[in-house]
Structure formats: structure tokens, C-alpha cells
Image (spheres, grey):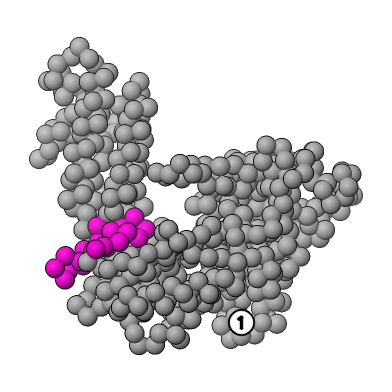
């Protein structure tokens, strides 16, 4: 542990070191007005198209095994002006754009963003330590560590992520669904259903959880196996973090909060599927992974136990291990939870429903919001609750959730009724009802005002989801994914606004993982 003093000086004996990242000649100075004009004049469609063109070439070269060409194209991308523009745009548009690192710097203005583009370079690059914070885990007493890089380091990670993502997508396990372009938790759920729903399907499930995945990946393995500039990767991994003004070195793991971290974690875990396929051929052993959570189907309990031992050996070479408490073997008739869904067979029929934990979490979230809103205007409360209701309902709309939606609506009514009674303790039943609820159509109790109306869970139509072609590559089979998106949009019954029913990755293949890690 070292003391933090103004700048990162641990390797220089405490002597402040000025590191200049600027690529602009000293004799050439740009005014803020000129830089802002340049940024605002950027044609982002052309920028995205150019970056995507290089990414497609990288993916194709990776597929063909031309690693020397991959290296040259990767260098070309990370040193191109268009990629730097896109990298800065990524870090200034995500959810962490107003969260500074240890230097307290934010890129808010257009001139600051353009100046950052001109200064972005790997020449004498030295990553600063990350700012460590701890956030509570849902339903747990423990807290999750989050490391926040500086804006400059985030931009460097985004830049190299643009070059690494096509490689990761091309070499990834076919049944890996987390932190992937054009893939989602719903895809993982639907594929698990396809593997377990039939009468002759596997009956045993290995529920896997990797212990501290992001925090324990061996740096040596990453340095030897990740196709990226090693000096840059070492800066990302060895930057350390600051907590309570003390500097702590990082000897293992990838920082939770870094843009490139999910890609590194995915590439570390890729290969489990192929290993299981080779070890258990033609045995109904299927591997489904979302980030560090995974399932393995097996025809017998003994084969599930063998699969667990094989996965443990695979992870050991990467510095990881399975959590003994969370890694269990379950029969399909007993049911199991995965990604907020509950899978269970009832008399031979597989039903996928919202899990009890997921239901309790949404109830707790609604209760907390309404409790804070005792002095709010009704419109403000509706505007806060609607995104929560819409997001949870859209997540579970592909499952057997109609009954759950009805129960949650009744729960919301009870919570809102207590809210109204608390605001007007001296008013009667009829007065409170007419003040906040109005009849509409066939409904007697609609929580609304003249400006806004509370959404109902049951307004969400239930429809069957389909997972994408497992061998499709988002960079090489782009037409397929765009057509699939259009097909899904046409399939959804338009009862209401469906803007959040399908979140499309940007055309450039930009990594959008940082928002989940924050």
C-alpha cells in the first residue's frame, strides 16, 4: 500500500512525473471555439462506417487464421483518427460520463472532447490508478468493488476494445450470450429452454458460478493469450487503484468498471464449450454461459459431476475456481434459477417463470420509490415508476408471466393506496380514490393525471422469443442480424410503446458493456 500524492509516482521514487499524451505540435494551438466547431461538424455515420469496415476485416482475418494480418489491421485501427473519435464518443455518452477518475477530469464540452481526441496516443502511455468505490449487492450484505478509470484511460480502453471485439466475437464460444453484440439474456434463456423442454432432454443441470471472476483472472494468462499490444494491456491490468487516499497494486484480475474488462473476461472463459463437447460427445451435454454464470445440462448426475471437475481444471489454468457454495447439481423437476428466470418441469412440461428473487427485487424497488415519494407530485411519481415497470415487464415478457404481472399490479395498487392515505390521513375512501384514480375503458382504477398515466404490467403482451443463429458473426453476417431485428420488431404486437423491446448495438460494433459494470 502506497500513499497517493497528486500524481502516480510509485515507480519513480516519489518524484512527480509529467506525462504528456498530446500529439499536437507545440507550435500549433487550437482555440476552444475551433475545437468545438470541429467536433460538432463530425459526420458520425461516416466515422462508424470506417471503423466498422476495419473491424470486419479484422474479423475475417481472424476467421481465416491470418494472425499477422490481424496484427497489422489492429494497429491500423488503434492509430486511426476515426477510431479515436469514436472511442472518445463512447466514454462521453455512456452512463459514467459524469463520474470522474482520480484526476477529477471530465470531458463535457465539445472542445474538451476534440482536444481529447487529438491527445489520444499510445506513445509513452502510462495508465493512472483507478478510483475504487463499493456498491451494495442486491439482497446481500456484501458490497461489489467498482474501479473507475480516468477519462483518458477509459478512452484508451475503448479504443483498444474496438480492435479486440471483432477477434473476441469470432473466437467466442457459440453458446456464450453475455457481453456479446446482438445477444441477450433472453437468448440464453430461450436456448436453455430448447435444451431442456423435450421429453427426452437432459434431466440434470450443473449450475455454475465462478468465484470472483473479474478479480482473480491470472495476469500471466492474459498477457500470453490476449491478442493485443502487451505493453498497453499491462498498463490496463497493473494500474492499481486508489481507496481512501491509498494506492493498492493489482496483481490479479481485470478492473470491474473498465470498458475492456468484459471482453477480457469473455475471452478468458471461451473454450469451456469446446472442451465439454470433446470430453462428452453425443451425451446431451450442452453448455450455456452468460458472463460468469453458466449452465451445463447432463443426462445423469454422474456426468454432471464429471463436467464440474473438468471445468474446475480448465479454470485453474486461468487462475479461477468455482464457488463451492453456488455451484450445485439440480434435477429439472426441482427447478433452478438462471438470470432472473426460474426453470422447472411440472409433470413433464417445462415452464419458465420470473424467479422469486426477481419478483421480490422489483417489489422492493417499487416500495422504496413510493416511500421516497411521499411529498412528490403524482406526475413525478408516475414518471419514476413507469421505466421500472416497463423494463421489468419487457425482460420477462417471453416467459409464463401473465399471472405474475397480475399479482404485481395488485401489489402496486396496495402500495399506492397507502401512499394516498399517508398524504391525506383525514380524507375518506371515495375522496382519495377520485383524487388519484380514474376509470378508463374497462378499468376502474387507473392511476393517472391529465399529463401522465401509470403503466400496467398486463399491458405488456407475452410473446415467444427466438435465439439467434449460434454460428452467426455480427461482423461477417451483419445482414442476418439486421433482418432478424426487423423481423422481431414486426412480430411484437404494438399495444404500446415498444422502444425498449429490442436494444440494437450501434452499427459500428461499439462495446456497450461499461454501463452494466458501473
Q: Name the residue that disc number 1 marks.
A: 61
Residue at 24 percent across and 23 percent down: it is 420
Q: Main secondary structure of the magenta part?
A: strand
Name the residue at 72% across, 52% down.
249
Q: Name the spot of residue 367 as percent of width and height, x first.
A: 31, 34
The reply to whether residue 69 is visible in this rendering is yes
Q: Quadrant of residue 174?
A: bottom left
Residue 348 as seen in the image, left or right of residue 467: left
Q: Position of residue 391 (x, y in %)?
A: 34, 48
* Magenta segment boundaries in residue numbering: 334-353
Q: Residue at x 77, y 40 (%)?
A: 3
Give left or right: position of 56 versus 473. right
Residue 110 higher or lower than 504, as above or below:
above
Q: Indicate the position of residue 83 as horizontal and vertical percent values.
A: 65, 62
Quarter of the image holding residue 222? bottom right
Q: Is residue 268 left or right of residue 39?
A: left
Badge 1: how crowded within 10 Å, few (<14), some, or many (20+)? Answer: many
Does 169 appear in magenta? no
Residue 220 percent location from the top left of the image = 69, 68
Q: Nearer the viewer, residue 335 or 52?
A: 335
> In terms of depth relative to the viewer, which is nearer, 145 or 37?
145
Residue at far top of view? 426
The magenta stretch spans residue 350: yes
Residue in the image at 27% along x and 68% along y: 331
Q: Can you see residue 389? A: no
Q: Helix or strand or loop: what does disc 1 sit on?
A: helix
450 relative to 247, above or below = above
Could you tell me which quadrant the N terminus lies in? top right
Compared to residue 120, the image places residue 173 above or below, namely: below
Amino acid at each position: 500500500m502506497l500513499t497517493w500524492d497528486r500524481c502516480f509516482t510509485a515507480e519513480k521514487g516519489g518524484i512527480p512525473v509529467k506525462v504528456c499524451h498530446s500529439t499536437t505540435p507545440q507550435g500549433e494551438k487550437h482555440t476552444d471555439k475551433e475545437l468545438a466547431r470541429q467536433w460538432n461538424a463530425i459526420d458520425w455515420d461516416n466515422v462508424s462506417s470506417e471503423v466498422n469496415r476495419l473491424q470486419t476485416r479484422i474479423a475475417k482475418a481472424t476467421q481465416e487464421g491470418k494472425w499477422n494480418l490481424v496484427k497489422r489491421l489492429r494497429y491500423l485501427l488503434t492509430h486511426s483518427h476515426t477510431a479515436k473519435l469514436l472511442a472518445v464518443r463512447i466514454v462521453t455518452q455512456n452512463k459514467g460520463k459524469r463520474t470522474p477518475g482520480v484526476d477529477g477530469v471530465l470531458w463535457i464540452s465539445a472542445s474538451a472532447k476534440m482536444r481529447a481526441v487529438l491527445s489520444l496516443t499510445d506513445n509513452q502511455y502510462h495508465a493512472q490508478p483507478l478510483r475504487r468505490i463499493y456498491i451494495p449487492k442486491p439482497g446481500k450484505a456484501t458490497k461489489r468493488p467498482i474501479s473507475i478509470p480516468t477519462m483518458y484511460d477509459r478512452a484508451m480502453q475503448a479504443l483498444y476494445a474496438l480492435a479486440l471485439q471483432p477477434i473476441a466475437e469470432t473466437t467466442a464460444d457459440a453458446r456464450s450470450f453475455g457481453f456479446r453484440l446482438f445477444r441477450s439474456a433472453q437468448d440464453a434463456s430461450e436456448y436453455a429452454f430448447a435444451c431442456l423442454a423435450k421429453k427426452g432432454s437432459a434431466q440434470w443441470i450443473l449450475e455454475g458460478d465462478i468465484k470472483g471472476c473479474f478479480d482473480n483472472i491470472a495476469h500471466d494468462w492474459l498477457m500470453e493469450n490476449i491478442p493485443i499490444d502487451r505493453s498497453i494491456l499491462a498498463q490496463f491490468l497493473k494500474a492499481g487503484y486508489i481507496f481512501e487516499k491509498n494506492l493498492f497494486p493489482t496483481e490479479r484480475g481485470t478492473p470491474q468498471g473498465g470498458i475492456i474488462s468484459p471482453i477480457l473476461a469473455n475471452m478468458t472463459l471461451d473454450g469451456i464449450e469446446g472442451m465439454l463437447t470433446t470430453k462428452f460427445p453425443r451425451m446431451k451435454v450442452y453448455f450455456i454461459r452468460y458472463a460468469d454464470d453458466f449452465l451445463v445440462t447432463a443426462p445423469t448426475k454422474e456426468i454432471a459431476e464429471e463436467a464440474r471437475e473438468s471445468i474446475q481444471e480448465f479454470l485453474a489454468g486461468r487462475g479461477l475456481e468455482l464457488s463451492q457454495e453456488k455451484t450445485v447439481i439440480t434435477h429439472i423437476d426441482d427447478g433452478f434459477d438462471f438470470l432472473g428466470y426460474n426453470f422447472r418441469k411440472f409433470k413433464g412440461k417445462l415452464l419458465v417463470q420470473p424467479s422469486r428473487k426477481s419478483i421480490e427485487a422489483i417489489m422492493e424497488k417499487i416500495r422504496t420509490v413510493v416511500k421516497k415519494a411521499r411529498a412528490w407530485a403524482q406526475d413525478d411519481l408516475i414518471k419514476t415508476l413507469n421505466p421500472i415497470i416497463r423494463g421489468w415487464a419487457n425482460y420477462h415478457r417471453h416467459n409464463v408471466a401473465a399471472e405474475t404481472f397480475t399479482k404485481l399490479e395488485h401489489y402496486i395498487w396496495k402500495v399506492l393506496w397507502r401512499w394516498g392515505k399517508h398524504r391525506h390521513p383525514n380524507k375518506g375512501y371515495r375522496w382519495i380514490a377520485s383524487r388519484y384514480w380514474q376509470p378508463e375503458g374497462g378499468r376502474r382504477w387507473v392511476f393517472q393525471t391529465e399529463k401522465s398515466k401509470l403503466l400496467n404490467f398486463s399491458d405488456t403482451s407475452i410473446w415467444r422469443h427466438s435465439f439467434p443463429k449460434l454460428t452467426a458473426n455480427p461482423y461477417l453476417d451483419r445482414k442476418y442480424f439486421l433482418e432478424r431485428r426487423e423481423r422481431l420488431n414486426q412480430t411484437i404486437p404494438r399495444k404500446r410503446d415498444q422502444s425498449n423491446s429490442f436494444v440494437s448495438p450501434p452499427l459500428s460494433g461499439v462495446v456497450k458493456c461499461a454501463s452494466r459494470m458501473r
